[in-house]
């Protein structure tokens, strides 16, 4: 028996058109799951469907703003009618706004909290009842280094991802008795469009200062790639992790364990 198999399971990944969500969905598909994803607009969903098709994965994609409770409820009913009950939920959709806190507007702060924290709450509470009925469920919330650490300009994002860590633990506590496991994945610094501004080559051809900083703070001596997240995601989505609950699995190359390389 392959305890990592996802055969017969339906997995829903929010914001799954590209990046981490796309990689995780691809890994879950490779393990046998039927993939459903959403994104914020038609262009992203269509591009996403094409990208999945290009690697041989047949998916269903829907346009849905995960901060809109009514839209999420409608989508959950549509998925159940067209595909089936969702067994595995990956709360991946997210945004970041890098602004010094004292210069950040309250509306910008709220927008980040809305997408990165309120939305995982909305989506999880929408899909948990059908998981309870089915007798099992897996929820994976995509946390961050900022679930544990702060840095300049990311106050809203860190507040959201810190809250998402505790929401993950609370869902695990409240719904564990229904055979629902809720865990988090905390990616380190991963090469995606979201971190591209931190890796931009400088005019003189040198690496971005932040790029060099992250390399010095990562024992692995490199940025992560979305491939690094595939195995951890399959583990947390499969019965191999049926007794793992309320855990944040940091996939960070060792950043959280490391004081950093001495300069020079
Ligand atoms: P991302 O740029 O953060 O975006 C993820 C996807 O979510 C995008 O397609 C985005 O659409 C979509 N999205 C944003 N708001 C949405 C909404 N209201 N409703 C539906 N979809 C929405 O991609 P990523 O870098 O792959 O990050 C994925 C997740 O991992 C995020 O939660 C991020 O915070 C987290 N994370 C990233 C890193 C990293 O180093 N990249 C590290 C740790 C954690 P748009 O393109 O229109 O924004
Ligand atoms: C930043 C980065 C990080 C990563 C990720 C690290 O500006 O510090 O965007 O926040 O996205 O969350 O785990």
Image (cartoon, rainbow, N blue to C red):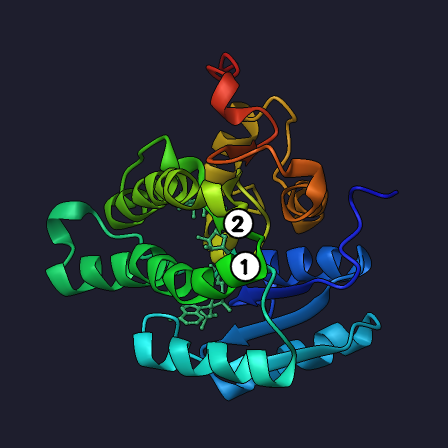
Classify mark 2: helix, strand or loop. strand
Q: Is residue 148 visible?
A: yes
Percent x, y of residue 84? 63, 75
For this rendering, which residue is in front, 71 or 175? 175
Q: Quarter of the image holding residue 54?
A: bottom right
Q: Is residue 163 left or right of residue 60?
A: left
Mark 2 surroundings within 10 Å by alpha-carbon count, few (fewer than 14), some (14 through 19), many (20 or more): many
Q: Residue at x 67, y 61 (%)?
A: 25
The residue shown at (51%, 17%) is 258
Residue assigned mark 2:
140
- The dot on residue 112 is none
Q: Is residue 84 above or below residue 258?
A: below
Q: Nearer the viewer, residue 221 or 174?
A: 174
Image location of residue 189, percent across then percent down? 53, 41
Towards the viewer: 69 or 239: 239
Left or right: 47, with 117 as reference point: right
Vertical side of 166 occupied by 49: above or below:
below
Q: Which quadrant of the frame does ligand 2 lie within?
A: top left
Where is residue 140 drawn, in percent x and y? 53, 49
Residue found at x 42% / y 46% = 175
Circles 2 and 1: CB atoms closer than 8 Å: yes
Above/below status of 208 relative to 97: above
Residue drawn 50% across the image and 75% down it: 39
In terms of secondary structure, where does tag 1 sit?
Answer: strand
Q: Which residue is mark 1?
A: 89
């Amino acid at each position: 028996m392959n305890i990592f198999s996802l055969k017969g399971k339906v997995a829903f990944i929010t914001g799954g058109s590209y990046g981490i969500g796309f990689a995780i969905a691809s890994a879950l598909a490779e393990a046998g799951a039927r993939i459903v994803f959403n994104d914020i607009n038609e262009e992203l969903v269509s591009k996403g469907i094409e990208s999945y098709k290009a690697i041989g994965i047949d998916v269903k994609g829907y346009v849905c703003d995960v901060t809109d409770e009514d839209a999420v409820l409608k989508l959950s009913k549509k998925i159940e009618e067209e595909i089936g009950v969702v067994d595995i939920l990956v709360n991946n959709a997210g945004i970041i706004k890098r602004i010094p806190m004292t210069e950040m507007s309250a509306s910008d702060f709220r927008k980040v909290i809305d997408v990165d924290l309120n939305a995982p709450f909305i989506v999880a509470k929408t899909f948990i009842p059908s998981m309870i009925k089915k007798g099992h469920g897996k929820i994976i919330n995509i946390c961050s280094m900022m679930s544990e650490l702060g840095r300049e300009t990311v106050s809203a994002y860190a507040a959201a991802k810190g809250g998402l860590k505790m929401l993950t633990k609370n869902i695990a506590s409240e719904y564990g008795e229904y055979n629902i496991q809720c865990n988090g994945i905390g990616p380190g610094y991963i090469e995606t469009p979201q971190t591209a501004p931190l890796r931009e080559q400088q005019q003189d051809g040198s690496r971005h200062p932040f790029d060099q900083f992250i390399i010095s703070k990562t024992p692995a001596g490199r940025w992560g790639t979305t491939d690094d997240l595939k195995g951890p995601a399959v583990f947390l989505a499969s019965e191999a992790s049926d007794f793992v609950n309320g855990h944040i699995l940091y996939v960070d190359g060792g950043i959280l364990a490391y004081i950093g390389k001495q300069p020079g």
